[in-house]
Image: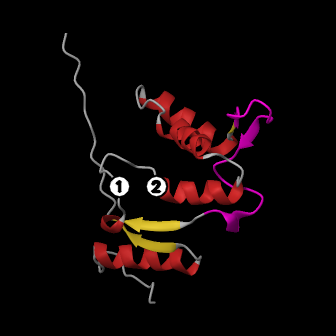
Amino acid sequence: MDYNFVRGQFTEAELEAAIIGLFQEQDYVYVTGDTIHRGFEETLLKDDMRVYLSTRYPDLTEAETETVIGRLENIPSAPLYQGNRETFLLVNEGFDLMRDDPGKLALHIDYIDWAEPESNIFKVVNQFSILARIFHRVS
């Protein structure tokens, strides 16, 4: 693939294709956003998260898996800074999951496998549409 672009002499589509190609060279799976089955308000790829969690933590129950996903999915978005900060900390540091079975010890959950990066699911996705909900406060 030719990555030698002259300033102003390439299209947005060519630039997008070049960037996608660079990610594919790093073993990312390329997916177009319109092929991902989800609600347009959902930003988390829950099927990928379930696969990751079942591989990394095979003894999680289905309910515990949904709790782990819900912990990330249900972070309030307002105020924006606080929501972004909480998401950043949760994704980077993980959390301790209290198990459904009281006989089992709490389990530290990491959303990213830092020790074995190849255990993560890497995707490059383009044209991923998100429906934003805007709420107005009426005084």
Looking at the rendered structure, the number of numbered marks drawn on it comes to 2
Label 2 crowding class (10 Å Cα cut-off): few <14, some 14-19, many 20+?
few
Relative image position of residue 92 (x, y in whole percent): 65, 44
Horizontal side of residue 80 vs 87, given as left or right: left
Q: Residue at (50%, 67%) from the top-left corner?
A: 123
Disc 2 residue type (three-letter): Leu
Residue bearing the label numbered 1: 38
Q: Is residue 114 above or below residue 86?
A: below
Q: Are marks 2 and 1 in contact (CB under 8 Å)?
A: yes
SS for dot 1: loop
Q: Residue at (67%, 47%) from the top-left corner?
A: 60
Q: What is the C-alpha distance between the residues marked 2 and 1?
A: 8 Å
* Magenta span: 96-120
Residue found at the far bottom of this picture: 1
Magenta-highlighted stretch: main secondary structure? loop
Horizontal side of residue 1 vs 71, given as left or right: left
Look at the image and tell me in which quarter the C terminus lies: top left
Q: Residue at (59%, 41%) from the top-left corner?
A: 68
Q: Is residue 115 above or below residue 83?
A: below
Residue bearing the label numbered 2: 45
Q: Nearer the viewer, residue 24 or 56?
A: 56
Magenta highlight on residue 107: yes
Disc 1 residue type (three-letter): Arg
